[in-house]
Image: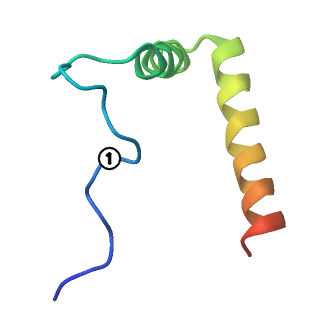
Amino acid sequence: MAHAISHAPAYPRPVGRTNVLTSQELSWGIVLLLAWLGWPIAREFLAWVLLKAYDLYITYVH
């Protein structure tokens, strides 16, 4: 059964760049790594981002 979830990227990649992380992707990767390693500031930041995303979802989508 087919599903409606698209596997296309959420934004177009710059032309001519293949398998290279953008600065935004690299920054998020570093934050996730630091949070996984137990750095408290990164954990607090990720918790804030998730709560803010949930708040925006409840406010504007739900």
Residue 40, given in percent of the width and then of the height, sits at 69, 14
Can you give x and y, in whole percent of width and height, for residue 35 in the image? Answer: 55, 19
Q: Nearer the viewer, residue 24 or 53?
A: 24
Q: In this figure, which residue is indicated by the disc labeled 1?
A: 9
The colour mode here is: rainbow
Report the residue that reaches farthest toward the bottom. 1
Where does residue 5 sit, x and y in percent of width and height?
Answer: 33, 70
Residue closest to the eye, 42 or 57: 57
Q: Is residue 3 above or below residue 55?
A: below
Q: Hey, which residue is sitting farthest right in the picture?
A: 59
Q: Assign a secondary structure to mark 1.
A: loop
Residue at x 42%, y 22% (from the top left corner):
25
Direction from residue 48 to residue 31 in the image, left or right:
left
Considering every residue shown, the one lying at the far front of the view is 15
Q: Quadrant of residue 14?
A: top left
Residue plotted at (72% across, 71% down): 61
Q: Is residue 14 left or right of residue 33?
A: left
Label 1 crowding class (10 Å Cα cut-off): few <14, some 14-19, many 20+? few
Q: As shown in the figure, which amino acid type bears the numbered disc 1?
A: Pro
Image height check: is 56 above or below 9?
A: below
Residue 42 occupies quadrant: top right
Quarter of the image that includes the N terminus: bottom left
Q: Quadrant of residue 21?
A: top left
